Amino acid sequence: DWSAASFIETTVAELKEQLGDDKVVLGLSGGVDSSVAAVLLNRAIGKNLTCIFVDHGMLRKNEFKNVLHDYECLGLNVIGVDASAKFFAELAGVTEPEEKRKIIGKGFIEVFDEEAHKIKDVKWLAQGTIYPDCIESLSITGTVIKSHHNVGGLPEKMHLKLCEPLRLLFKDEVRRVGRGLGMPEHLITRHPFPGPGLAVRILGDITPEKVAILQNADDIFIQGLRDWKVKDADGSETSLYHQVWQAGVILLSVQSVGVMGDERTYERAIALRAVTSTDAMTADWAHLPYEFLGKVSNDIINKVKGVNRVTYDISSKPPATIEWE
Ligand code: XMP
């Protein structure tokens, strides 16, 4: 049966054999998959791996800075590129979800391509694609439900050979490999986050102001999940964060009436989303404690200017999806 230690040993040997002295470039997203792929490749080929981490402006609050620091601590050869202005300009006025994905996917390739061309003689593009990415993108019925931009597109454009060391793994296996590689627990247990980031959590058009509202609300929700300690099934202490598969906040495109002191307000509504799952193919809404939901709602309404109503999404996948767009 499958073990992380033997996967690491075999894969590092195969990568050495396959890549030799070739130079490899890899796009880091901050997520578990690309980070584990990078550390695995770093172990196999060291400085011949260059990682590129693009900030498209749709990341979580302080994410770019924090994650870049984590990568540097892991000894990765990483270039951080702040391209947020480009993405804000290109996304202005765009409301259709797949259109947003296309713009971000294309913009990402442009920024990545430009950086990759600065490295001499790159032969390979490495990606942290995992098994469910492959099947959801090439669904059996042929219907593309959502286009996931971390699959396909890049290698043809760049005339590079593709290296995907995690393509046969499920998420829990990727996490076990990360632990086997000695990566810090907070990187390994991070929730999945979509490639287009907060762009698909803002319904309708995107502005820097909306992104800032969403980042602040999201930060309160996620920090709240981390801080709320609970007992796991085996009696050990854990947090709500670790009990859910993925969580985030959706900025809705409606405003609603509220009251603050003696004043009538007319501000934004948000939805909290938290799900349990094992592979993101199906998911159940997380049954978070009412006390917790009440506290987060109060904190968000009190601290995030522009939000006066908080709702909780209680839909499962299918028929809903995890993201709203
Ligand atoms: P859905 O919303 O389809 O999401 O139930 C399933 C998982 O995929 C993530 N997701 C994306 N990941 N690019 C990505 O890299 C995307 O465009 C994208 N859309 C959704 C989502 O966060 C969840 O983990």
Image (tube, grey):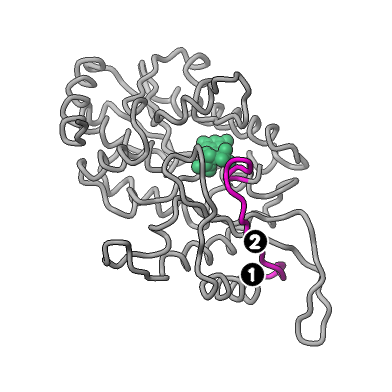
Q: Nearer the viewer, residue 301 or 239?
A: 239
- For label 1, the SS is loop
**Is residue 33 found left or right of 196 in the rendered image?**
left
Residue 304 image label: 1
Which mark identifies residue 141?
Answer: none
Q: What residue do we see at 53% from left, 25% from top?
A: 137
Q: Amino acid at mark 2?
A: Ile
Q: Are marks 2 and 1 in contact (CB under 8 Å)?
A: yes
Q: Is residue 103 magenta?
A: no
Image quadrant in which the N terminus is located:
top left
| In front of the other: 291 or 195 | 291
Residue 250, given in percent of the width and then of the height, sits at 64, 54
Q: Position of residue 241 (x, y in %)?
A: 42, 60
> Residue tagged by mark 2?
213
Q: Residue at x 50, y 64 (%)?
A: 288
| 291 over 176 or under it: above or below | below
- Callout 2 secondary element: helix
